[in-house]
Amino acid sequence: MNRVVKIFVLILIAVIFFFLAKGMNEAKTVEIGDLAYDFELEDTTGNIHRLSNYQGHYVIINFFATWCEPCINEAEELEKFQQKYGKEISLLIIDKGEPKNRVLTFKEKMKSTSLYLLDKDNKVSEKYNVVGQPETFIIDENGIIRKKIVGPTTADHLFDTISTLKAER
């Protein structure tokens, strides 16, 4: 009986350590209503951008990949948004783990004036719990995540969503 208790205690301790270790390895991801994770990423020209530098006005973060067909289709809409609303709302397009030259080629092909940032190791994508692409986050002037859009969106939908969010305040 004593041996059975010892084995049970050892198994129980092993299970506890397993779950503690698992919990320590899981990174906290952000959700709607959370303060947006403040990242620092390089753009396609080598400049560094921090999300916190954009605090004080609305920011759209769009996660994409150059090979993603819905992202390619959405790129034209994002460029329309940039041209129409870019002075009042910042648009940050974040590439998920691709080489800079591939993103530059994509940007040139699309004739885009938007700001493309490089998430080389996918750490920012992981913090935002981005599992696919495109995924878009709308962040308010206080740095709070107000909306997440999974899948492609349009310039008008983005602007209408931000207008609605501003009116709710």
Image: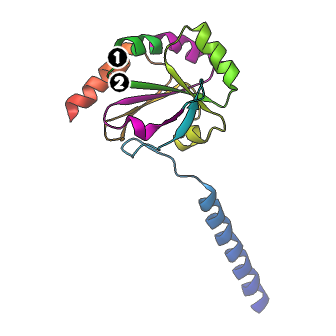
Q: What's the distance in space between the residues labelled 1 and 2, CA to CA?
A: 6 Å
Q: Where residue 122 appears, x then y in whole percent?
A: 63, 38
- Residue 35 falls within the magenta-colored stretch: no
**Left or right, 53 with reference to 112:** left
Name the residue at 37% across, 20% down: 158
Quarter holding residue 105: top right
Question: Looking at the image, can residue 1 be seen?
Answer: no
Name the residue at 66% across, 34% down: 120
Identify which amino acid the numbered label 1 is placed on: Tyr
Q: Where residue 22 appears, x then y in whole percent?
A: 64, 60
Quick one: SS at disc 1? helix
Q: Which residue is mark 1?
A: 85
Name the residue at 39% across, 46% down: 34
Identify which amino acid the numbered label 2 is placed on: Ile
Q: Which residue is mark 2?
A: 89
Question: Looking at the image, can residue 50 be seen?
Answer: yes
Q: Where residue 37 appears, x then y in whole percent?
A: 47, 44
Span shown in magenta: 48-77
Quarter holding residue 123: top right
Quick one: SS at disc 2? loop
Q: Residues within 10 Å of mark 2 (few under 14, many from 20)?
A: some
